[in-house]
Image (cartoon, helix red, strand yellow):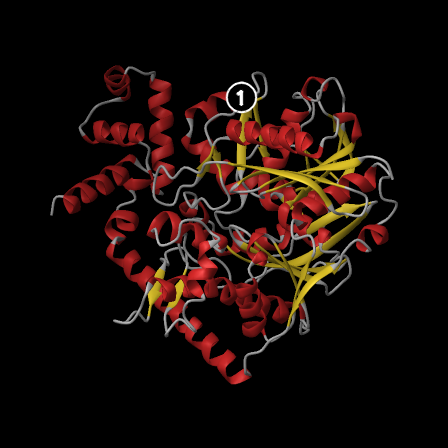
Amino acid sequence: MNGYILSIDQGTNGSKAIIFNHDGNIVAAAFHEVDQYYPHAGWVEQDANEIWQKTLLAVSDVLRNARILPEDIRAIGISSQRCTSVVWNKTTGEPIGRAITWQDRRTQYICDRITDKEKSEILERSGCIPVPNASFSKIKWLMEEDRTIQKALAHEELLFGTIDTWLIWKLSGGTSHVTDYSNAFGTGLLDTTHLVYDEWTLNEFKIPKNILPVIKSSSEIYCHTDPRLFSGVPIPISGCVGDQTAAAFGQACTEPGMIKNTYGTGSFMILNTSKTHYLPGDGVITPVLWTVNGKTDYGLEGFADVSGAVINWLRDGLGIIRDEYDADGLAMQVPDTQGVFFVPALVGLGAPYNSPNARGTILGIGLGTSKSHIARAAIESIAYQTRDSLECIEKKYGKKIDTLRVDGGGAKSDFLMQFQADILGIPVERPEVIETSAQGAAYMAGLSVGYWESIEEVKSNWRLDTHFEPRMSASKREDLYASWQNAIHCAQNWGERDKTSTKRSSEDSKMGRLSPRETEVIKLIVAGKNTREIAELLFTSQKTVEKQRHDAMRKLEVDSIATLVRLYLKQDSDSSK
């Protein structure tokens, strides 16, 4: 088969461009890191323009490295980090503020105010747990907190998209505003039964449908690239899929019961359930995996928010390694962790523990503990979290899993993969190509243009590299896992203690929810100023003052100005003690 497929894999750490041939092998690859920003505790942001520019650089580099021309590219497929949210002005094409990433926790208070009845409704409709990862909470936060967003909404100039949508918009020269079902699932706005945006959820959170991208299948020609980007050559963009479901497709997990785990910034386990759509819960979400040739596959998914990111923390936070490749060598200098356990709850603990206030915790430190023990405990924490996910999926699926396919950057580590097999008690299989997110997107793109004829043909490209058999005794395995769960409880308890100690500032005093301008408006109301006087003092309109007062009352969950004043005075009195 002549030509190649270009895959863009845009992840949390950076933008990767990979060229695949018909055998599913990598011809050339290029990567450019993308910065992350942490302006406040729990906030994680990225620059959407930087994502775009680094993607272009990666594409340019990979074409040069492969020594091929744009006209040799038959199609482009895109896999991307799910849930990360970008908003931009559809007239100028410029993003409004930074992208809010999937790891960001600023919307926890929005999720907390969702009632149990509403949570059940969301779960049943979307298959998505209402947690800060989901894009709908980020859209709601932007609509409530960002005046530029509010203005763009009022002028009908706002567009929203996850990273796939943003990249297709930019690659097409602003002509195509689309996403696929797997990425739409990550927004929490998809009715996973009828495969349309869910009107109840949109109405409940007052999210206008006209800012959302059109939902397409994962494998079809959405548009062509702007000819100016590739020396006058328009290339079809014909594959679009979320990174984790793309990895499942690249791993040939296309039959019911096949399962893979991807080790990246976080770790994500997906089991294919084909046409069967399970109800979410018990630590498992039920994503739409992909839609190809009119057939939709569903799955079961368990995940950990911090996986490979803990290795980055050893480098950037603790400074005990120079790069991620040093971690294995450091860990293997000792035969075990000497009883040390590392719970990487650096952004809280998600499913199955659902403890947003849990904090990263290292337990079991003694006089003999060294940096090698800590590095080994950090790596082993990745495997323990994967077992957490597997147990939840097995419980929901009702069957035991006998083999796990693995991929992603962490799968390069023989040490981690052997310990993974040991702590699971089942074989772990690593394929020759571990860049399976990019590979899955390439397959989606190639199928739609006839580069590959069928799913069966792309499945035949999967080839085993290394098979890891468990070597650990069952008794030792269960003892270690019991100690891990004890460490989890300690991290959870610490989070609850921290939550209690800060309750006055984060719960009894709800003033932290307000923007600085809303706080100023409340202060002036308490001081006895009327709307006109406040507008004059703040150099704004009376209408704006009324809106800020209304927004403040909604965030503080009060229904009268008298209650608002009492709450402020109580907070002021408490803070002066």
Q: Is residue 219 placed above or below 212 in the rendered structure? A: below
Reading the image, the residue beneath label 1 is 94
Q: Residue at x 49, y 62 (%)?
A: 382
Camera-side residue: 95 or 16? 16
Q: Residue at x 47, y 60 (%)?
A: 328
- Expressed as whole percent of the image width and height from the top left, the position of residue 349 reads 44, 58
Q: Residue at x 52, y 25 (%)?
A: 95
Q: Is residue 62 placed above or below 257 in the rendered structure? A: above
Q: Is residue 209 placed above or below 295 in the rendered structure? A: above
Q: Is residue 378 visible?
A: no
- Expressed as whole percent of the image width and height from the top left, the position of residue 27 reads 72, 41
Q: Residue at x 26, y 53 (%)?
A: 502
Camera-side residue: 178 or 322? 322
Determine the secondary structure under disc 1.
loop
Q: Is residue 146 placed above or below 450 in the rendered structure? A: above
Q: Quadrant of residue 343?
A: bottom left
Q: What is the tally of numbered marks visible in this picture? A: 1
